[in-house]
Image (cartoon, rainbow, N blue to C red):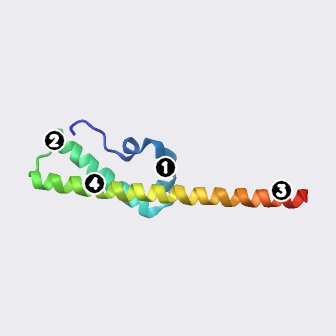
Amino acid sequence: MFGEKHDLHHEFPEYESEIRHLKMNNNHFARFFDEYDELAHELTRIQQGIENHADDYVEGLKKKRLFYKDELHFMILKHKRKEKKKALKAEKKRLKEKQKAAG
């Protein structure tokens, strides 16, 4: 819709820290993030009347933006699962060491 913000930080505010981490540490994510951001800005310019394009071109951009958004969301969720796994593994190790020291 006109006037809506589609940058990734507005789309997924709950993943702000993950987005920041992935942008700095994952080149694939960073490249997709930049592509998504460029598409979002181009669509904003079109909606504001700064640029004019045929409807089928605009629809193509929207589909492409949605593809990137889905891929980025998948990468964020994958990163969260990986971090959760690491935390669980560390906690198991800590408990095992604690149990070993007490026993």
Q: Which residue is mark 3?
A: 98
Q: Closer to the N terminus: mark 1 or mark 4?
A: 1
Q: Which residue is mark 1?
A: 20
Report the Cα–Cα distance between label 4 and label 3: 49 Å
Snapshot quadrant of residue 84 = bottom right
Report the Cα–Cα distance between label 1 and label 3: 34 Å
In the structure shown, which secondary structural element does the residue marked by tag 2 occupy? loop
Q: Cβ–Cβ below 8 Å for labels 1 and 2?
A: no
Q: Which residue is mark 4?
A: 65
Q: Is residue 24 left or right of residue 35?
A: right
Task: Give the percent coordinates (x, y) of residue 15.
Answer: 47, 46
Residue at point 27% right, 46% down?
A: 41
Quadrant in which the N terminus appears: top left
Q: Closer to the N terminus: mark 2 or mark 4?
A: 2
In the structure shown, which secondary structural element does the residue marked by tag 1 occupy? helix
Task: Give the percent coordinates (x, y) of residue 12.
Answer: 41, 45
Amino acid at pointer 4: Arg
Report the Cα–Cα distance between label 3 and label 2: 64 Å
Q: Closer to the N terminus: mark 1 or mark 2?
A: 1
Q: Closer to the N terminus: mark 3 or mark 2?
A: 2
Q: Which residue is mark 2?
A: 50
Rate crowding at label 3 as few (under 14), some (14 to 19) or many (20 or more) other CA atoms within 10 Å: few
In the structure shown, which secondary structural element does the residue marked by tag 3 occupy? helix
- In depth, the one of 29 and 12 nearer the eye is 12
Residue at point 51% right, 46% down?
A: 17
Amino acid at pointer 2: Ile
